[in-house]
Image: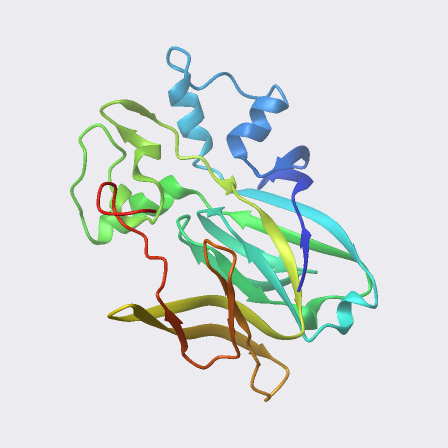
Amino acid sequence: MEQVLLNGTWEMQEVGQNTWIPAQIPGSVYSVLLAAGQMEDPFYRANEESALARMEKDYLFRRTFTLSPAQLEHQAVLLRCEGLDTLADLFINGHKIAHTDNMHRTWEFEIRSLLRSGDNEISILFSSPTKFIREENSKIPVDGSHESSVGFPHLRKAHCMFGWDWGPRLPDAGIWRDISLLFIDSFRLESVRISQAHEENAVTLCFHPEYQRFGTEEQPKFRYTLTAPDGQVFSSSGEPLRIENPALWWPNGYGAQ
């Protein structure tokens, strides 16, 4: 698997305005405006109020990236977004690919069919979080902290960003973690769960891999290698692995580590 980061220099525009501002990603509306000298320190005196008002607007982030013909020969190309805050519409070369509504998770989207050799454009439109919670709360009123923006529980966004007894109301928006392209052929290993069956002076390990398949009906082959504290190496091609006299880990005071 090949990974290409899309971090770095983007540009941002307040929707309805004509000017674009350089934006460093990972970053946010506030960080971009602060770096450009277009916003006062939101933690100083009453600047919280003007910062909060900015989130009544929508903001567009965009950048171009270049792909080679060889990169498009992969079976799949995934757009991996590790942190989008929060209400976002994603576009590749003008085609909408997704809408996201949760800043607390990673999002992945298959986009190979929309890509081309040479220059490509990605753009992400972030909608106003304050308008969203106000509109949703008019439909279903919910309670919350009295120091916070009314309706904040309607959005899967860090709730303290809407204010708390110890903090200001600064419901920022943006690409707050890495964003990248994943070029994949055949399989991608996601995780391996190892179960243990203990008996007297032995343990049997069973391996349970989780994977994604791309463009193939074949079954993947796995080999697992276990290295004991004394350097002894055990291996398995997927079958249960029995270890005689294993070096077990013990809590402090119960035995050697």
Report x, y in % for residue 135: 31, 48
Judged from this view, the residue extending furthest toward the bottom is: 217
In the foreground, 257 or 37: 257
Report x, y in % for residue 131: 37, 43
- Residue drawn at the location 25% of the way across and 41% of the way down: 252
In the foreground, 6 or 194: 194
In the foreground, 78 or 248: 248
The image quadrant that residue 44 belongs to is: top left
- Residue drawn at the location 43% of the way across and 36% of the way down: 56
Report x, y in % for residue 137: 24, 47
Is residue 19 at least partly visible in the picture? no
In the foreground, 120 or 57: 120
Report x, y in % for residue 103: 42, 48
Name the side, left or right, on which 12 lies relative to 200. right
The quarter of the image holding the N terminus is bottom right
- Residue drawn at the location 54% of the way across and 53% of the way down: 81
Name the side, left or right, on which 52 lies relative to 226. left
Q: Is residue 104 above or below residue 31?
A: below
Is residue 158 at least partly visible in the picture? yes
Judged from this view, the residue extending furthest toward the top is: 45
